[in-house]
Amino acid sequence: MATVIVRYWAAAKEAAGIAEERSEAATLAELMTKITSNREGLARVVSRSSFLVDGDPVGRRAHETIVLKDGATVEVLPPFAGG
């Protein structure tokens, strides 16, 4: 299990009530389950967000296949409006 830093942006930051936190998880799927537990508003935002792991976009890869390394940074990027 890896200890990672989760950074929240825009609506995710607002829903989480913090800009970043530390958490432990082996995969991105496990991390998403942990950070959204008992945080319904954050769960809604995360469900439509994209993610960067150490600056690399996750894209459409299954979150169960994204193995997290100790010290990784996971950024939660909700959809941005504007043009």
Image: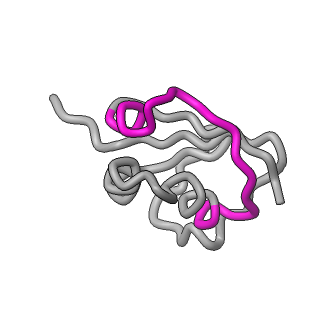
From what the image shows, is residue 37 above or below residue 83?
Answer: below
So how many labels did they put on this image? 0
* Residue at 42 percent of width and 41 percent of height: 77
Magenta region: which residues?
11-30
Q: Quadrant of the C terminus?
A: top left
Along the horizontal axis of the image, is 8 left or right of 5? left
Residue 15 location in percent, x, y? 37, 39
From what the image shows, is residue 82 above or below residue 72?
Answer: above
What colour scheme has been applied to the protein in the rendered image? one colour
Residue 1 sits in quarter = bottom right
Q: Residue most toward the front?
A: 38
Along the horizontal axis of the image, is 13 left or right of 22? left
From what the image shows, is residue 5 above or below residue 59?
Answer: above
Q: Is residue 19 magenta?
A: yes
Q: Is residue 59 magenta?
A: no
Residue 7 location in percent, x, y? 56, 34
Residue 47 location in percent, x, y? 37, 59
* Residue at 67 percent of width and 40 percent of height: 54
Viewer-side residue, 81 vs 40: 40
Residue 55 sits in quarter = top right
Viewer-side residue, 30 vs 67: 30
* Residue at 75 percent of width and 52 percent of height: 24
* Residue at 63 percent of width and 65 percent of height: 30
